[in-house]
Amino acid sequence: MAVIKFSRQREAIKSYLAQTTSHPTAATIYEELRTDHPNISLGTVYRNLNFLVEQGEILKISCDDGSDHFDGNTNPHYHFVCTSCHQVSDLDLPDMEHVNVLASANFAGKIVGHTTYFYGTCPQCLKQSQRVSDTVD
């Protein structure tokens, strides 16, 4: 097994993701880290994010608009993706382990987990939409 070399920039990315629940994109992470790490490049951020995803240390959430968002919380949980502003947020839901049982009923293999995204309009976009419709009426 190869030894993984310590990287201050990788640790900064992990630390940033551990302290936020905003599910930022690579560009957002880059902008946030540039102040304390002026020599960091966007390419370095992407490479380290991909490495951390491969190592199972963070999650990558791919959205329908082509953007990837990242989450430092690798514990099983569910996400909501706003189809208007494309923000990703955590959903506080009870575990849905029964979905694995349902899926296993018609599958000859072994299911050990699942990933579920919920899509719709976030509260902020709903408010914005309501304000626009109120001014039109």
Image (spheres, rainbow, N blue to C red):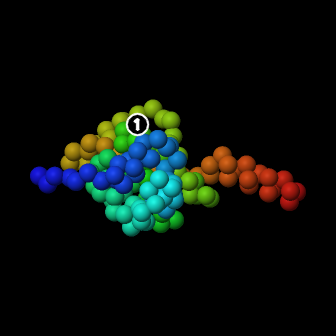
Of the pair 43 and 69, the residue shown nearer to us: 43
Query: Residue 13: image x %, image y %?
Result: 40, 51
Report the residue marked by disc 1. 96
Q: Residue furthest left?
A: 1
Of the pair 124 and 133, the residue shown nearer to us: 124
Residue at 14%, 54% (x, y): give it.
2
Query: Residue 25: image x %, image y %?
Result: 48, 58
Could you tell whether 127 is left or right of 21 in the image?
right
Q: Residue 77 occupies which quadrant of the picture?
A: top left
Q: Circle 1: is it few (<14), some (14-19), or many (20+) Cα within 10 Å?
A: some
Query: Residue 103: image x %, image y %?
Result: 32, 45
Of the pair 1 and 39, the residue shown nearer to us: 39
Residue at 36%, 42% (x, y): give it.
74
* Residue 19 visible somewhere in the drawing: yes
Could you tell whether 6 is left or right of 23 in the image?
left
Quadrant where the C terminus sits is: bottom right
The local secondary structure at tag 1 comes to: loop
Q: Amino acid at mark 1?
A: Met
* Residue 118 visible somewhere in the drawing: no
Residue at 37%, 63% (x, y): give it.
44
Residue at 81%, 56% (x, y): give it.
133
Q: How many marks?
A: 1
Query: Residue 56: image x %, image y %?
Result: 29, 48
Could you tell whether 104 is left or right of 21 in the image?
left
Q: Residue furthest top?
A: 94
Could you tell whether 5 is left or right of 77 in the image?
left
